[in-house]
Amino acid sequence: EAQVTQNPRYLITVTGKKLTVTCSQNMNHEYMSWYRQDPGLGLRQIYYSMNVEVTDKGDVPEGYKVSRKEKRNFPLILESPSPNQTSLYFCASSLSPTAIGETQYFGPGTRLLVL
Amino acid sequence: RKEVEQDPGPFNVPEGATVAFNCTYSNSASQSFFWYRQDCRKEPKLLMSVYSSGNEDGRFTAQLNRASQYISLLIRDSKLSDSATYLCVVRLRGKFYFGSGTKLNVKP
């Protein structure tokens, strides 16, 4: 089944404790992206990747890191989480960064609470 | 200025009603257009792509007006199950830009 998976789905952590949220897709998609969603603010892009080893900042990259060492995986790293990073996080992928009409597929989301 | 703007609603409509949402986008070079549906705290899912010629999928009709830079979604014969948040999405130079969503509540 074609899908985007994220782990963990739920995470409670404490300020400053490094964490990684994994994202994997099995559709051989080139484009992958991370978003956070907060009440009243909609979806905001954190980082995106057009292909392996190519990553770019989105609208809210501060406090986050990503890597794209292989096509299927795009982990999101919080080196020193803070309470303002408490949010619902979505990973998404798309076949091509440039193809007209090509849409995005989302993972199920990761709920993060930073105490 | 935001790339994509939507009326947040909520739109409260009775079952069977017809409801229309609009969104506007700021960059005339935008290349692809979509409507997504998001249920409470779940992942967004593609509802339909939007083309200049307009497209229809059952009770849903989407239109794109490039000259005025707006996208519309029309839902006919609303069902209770249509209650959700509808996100307008635009793609430009590879990146996706999301509107903040329009909330629809369909009441019995």
Image (cartoon, rainbow, N blue to C red):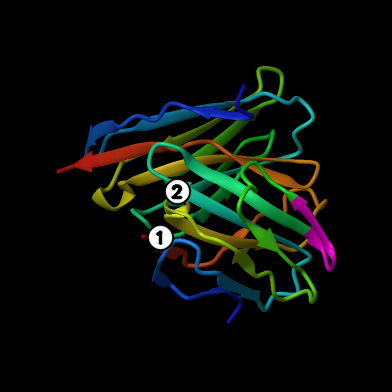
Residue B104 quadrant: top left
Most foreground residue, A39 or A16: A16
Q: Chain of mark 2?
A: A
| Residue B6 x %, y % | 49, 28
> Label 1, on which residue?
A114
Q: Residue at x 81, y 42 (%)?
A: B93
| Residue B86 x %, y % | 44, 42
Most foreground residue, A101 or B103: B103
Amino acid type of disc 2? Answer: Asn
In the rendered structure, the answer to whether residue A27 lies left or right of residue B76 reads right
Magenta stretch, main secondary structure class? strand
Residue B86 counted in the magenta span = no
Mark 1 and mark 2: span between their CA atoms?
8 Å
Magenta-drawn segment = A50-56
Q: Earlier in the sequence, mark 1 or mark 2?
A: 2
| Residue B88 x %, y % | 54, 38
> Label 2, on which residue?
A84
Residue A34 quadrant: bottom right
Q: Residue at x 44, y 57 (%)?
A: A88
Residue farthest top in this picture: B68
